[in-house]
Image: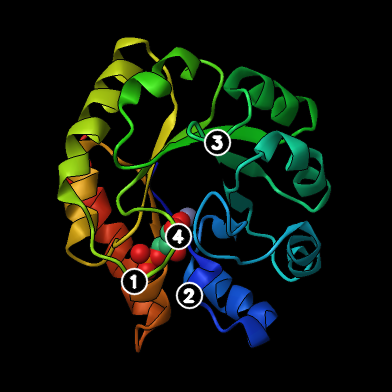
Amino acid sequence: MIKISPSILSCDYGRMADELKCMEECGADLMHIDVMDGHFVPNITLGAPVCKCIKKYTDVPFDVHLMISEPLKYVEDFCRAGADIICFHTESDSDTGETIDRIIECGAKPALAIKPKTDIDAVLPYLEKIAMVLVMTVEPGFGGQSFMADQMDKVRRIRDEINKRGLKTDIEVDGGINGETISIAAAAGANVFVSGSALFSASDRKETMDGFKEKAGTAFAG
Ligand code: DX5
Ligand code: ZN
């Protein structure tokens, strides 16, 4: 199933509640919350207290992307703050298997993210246990960067493996997704699309979201 997950990294932080409502009304399937610690990535955004405060303004499930060095330490906080999906990086310092187990214990869905230079071997052993793989299509840290088309080979190989094993694991792409790149990613086998700058800066967000869904649906190679 095709899902759009607007990245609130590109929203007006002073009007977050309105921005979430707006994206909900435009048809967002998930709400992508980018958490950065200034250590795993060279930027700082927000933590669990903010996540908890904004959770009450929308019914759209929270897709929390932890770009932090020690995700295991904060799993419980983010679960309590209303995270529905918790996605962390295999390149972080926490043990991957243990962190996945903790997320499940706390009642959220686990997802694993890989940076552009990381091979898919890092996620393949966990496909049965996780709800989603996130293939970064930019170096994590900032919105508004250009889509890395060379990551599509990884998306194709993960999709093949998911199909071969008869799984339903989602594949999410994050970074530089717009009206053109969404078709490229969907054709490679991605079905969940994060979009920050393209969606939030659109003059008509609803029309842009509808266009994204239509293009992804047409191009999707499942
Ligand atoms: C980058 C973040 C992305 C980013 C996407 O580190 O993980 O979610 O906000 O923004 P755009 O769509 O502008 O590339
Ligand atoms: Zn993200």
Label 3 sits on what residue type?
A: Ser
Residue 112 seen anywhere in this rendered image of the structure: yes
Q: Residues within 10 Å of mark 4 (few under 14, many from 20)?
A: some
Q: Earlier in the sequence, mark 1 or mark 3?
A: 3
Secondary structure at badge 2 equals: helix
Q: Quadrant of residue 168?
A: top left
The answer to which of marks 3 and 2 sits earlier in the sequence is: 2
Point 45% across, 13% down: residue: 125
Residue hosting label 2: 10
* Quadrant of picture, ligand 1: bottom left
Residue at left offset 30%, top offset 50%? 137
Residue at disc 1, CB closer than 8 Å to ligand 1: yes
Query: Which residue position holds label 4?
Result: 141
Marking on residue 144? 1
Circle 3 SS class: loop
Dot 3 alpha-carbon crowd within 10 angstroms: few under 14, some 14 to 19, many 20 or more: some
Residue 136 placed where, x, y %?
Answer: 36, 46
Q: Mark 4 or 3 closer to N-term?
A: 3
Between the residue at mark 4 and the residue at mark 3, the CA separation in whole angstroms equals 14 Å
Is label 2 within 8 A of ligand 1 (CB to nearest ligand atom)?
Answer: yes
Q: Are marks 4 and 3 in contact (CB under 8 Å)?
A: no
To which residue does mark 3 refer?
A: 92
